[in-house]
Image: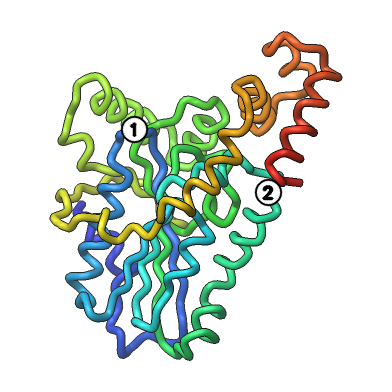
Amino acid sequence: MKLRGLIHNYLFFNIRELGGVRLHRATVIGEMGTGKTTLMARIAELLLQHYGEENVNIVRSQFLGNILKYLDDRPIQCLLLDDPLYYHFSHGFSRERKENVSQLAAIRHIWRKTYGIQKGLIILLVATQYYFVLDPFFRNAPLLMFKSVLNDPRDRYYLRKLVGKQKYMELAKQTFKIFFKRSEEAKSRVLIKPIGAKARWIEYQLPRINIEKYSVDDTPYIAEKQKHILGLDEKDRQILYLRLKGKKITQIAEIIGLAPSRVSERITKAITKLGLE
């Protein structure tokens, strides 16, 4: 099945027939190097072809807050949130993350009030290397696209539940082909799980557009975000990573080789240092 055929009714409309302002979400999940950004670029390209470049605003960013800054008054907003690692890292702690996700959930109203939009479509595509630790707003998107299996046991468990054992095994075989057989053909396939329907495979062509020209992340903005994470030492980052993965304090203490009280102390100091709560 071809890409455009399956997602046509979800992403492609007659602009004149749009009723009100809609928000349609899709999440692309897969390991680094499996072609998530390429898939999003192909979808963006199809949107440009369907609606016309004058009607589509494409914004690509690694940061939720940055996405919201670049909305405009065109009737189609294609927002590409590409591997927002800072927000995965801060899962469960960051007030900023929660506020930005809340803003994204209300983005239709923000867009309508800011630009006076009465009819339009916001398409939010999120590419991620994780599934279980995602905010429910992304994890439960009506359209999920899997480019590979993931190594985390909880990710594997939920993926099998979502797509079924057979499709999961097919996805695992595709993942092996991408990484160990360098199969470009495997990279041009994606396992789609629409809400209310069974998972199925679709194929797509490589995009011709240069997705980099739509990136709005400026160097100072990125540096400001990254310096918070880079300010932690390796042990602190490892402790927080294990905690975010659901490990207990005692389990982390055993893995890291510290007393449980020291692990708790380091977590508290790291959260304070990051400005999280």
The percent position of residue 77, horizontal first and vertical second, equals: 37, 72
Q: Relative to the observer, which residue lies in front, 277 or 189? A: 277
State whether residue 65 is above or below residue 17.
Answer: above
Evaluate whether residue 144 shows in this view: no
The percent position of residue 38, horizontal first and vertical second, equals: 25, 47
How dense is the environment of label 2, judged by Cα within 10 Å: few (below 14), some, or many (20 and up)? some
Circle 2 residue: 94
Query: Quarter-wise, where is residue 106 in the image?
Result: bottom right
The percent position of residue 101, horizontal first and vertical second, equals: 59, 60
State whether residue 105 is above or below residue 118.
Answer: above
Q: Where residue 171 is drawn, which disc sits there?
A: 1
* Tag in front: 2 or 1: 2
Query: Quarter-wise, where is residue 185 in the image?
Result: top left
Q: Relative to the observer, which residue lies in front, 145 or 63? A: 63
Kindly identify the amino acid type of the residue bearing the numbered disc 1: Leu
Label 2: element kind: loop
Q: Would residue 269 be found to the left or right of residue 255 on screen?
A: right
Q: Residue at x 52, y 53 (%)?
A: 138
Q: Residue at x 46, y 82 (%)?
A: 21
Q: How is the image coloured?
A: rainbow
Label 1: element kind: helix
Q: Mark 2 and 1 residues: CB-CB less than 8 Å, in contact?
A: no
Q: Would residue 127 be found to the left or right of residue 252 on screen?
A: left
How dense is the environment of label 1, judged by Cα within 10 Å: few (below 14), some, or many (20 and up)? many
Q: Where residue 53 is drawn, which disc sits there?
A: none
Query: Considering only order in the chain, which callout, 1 or 2, is on the residue closer to the N terminus?
Result: 2
Q: Relative to the observer, which residue lies in front, 219 or 205? A: 219
Kindly identify the amino acid type of the residue bearing the numbered disc 2: Ser
Q: How many marks?
A: 2
Label 2, label 1: how far apart the Cα atoms are = 33 Å
Query: Quarter-wise, where is residue 240 in the image?
Result: top right
The percent position of residue 217, horizontal first and vertical second, equals: 40, 55
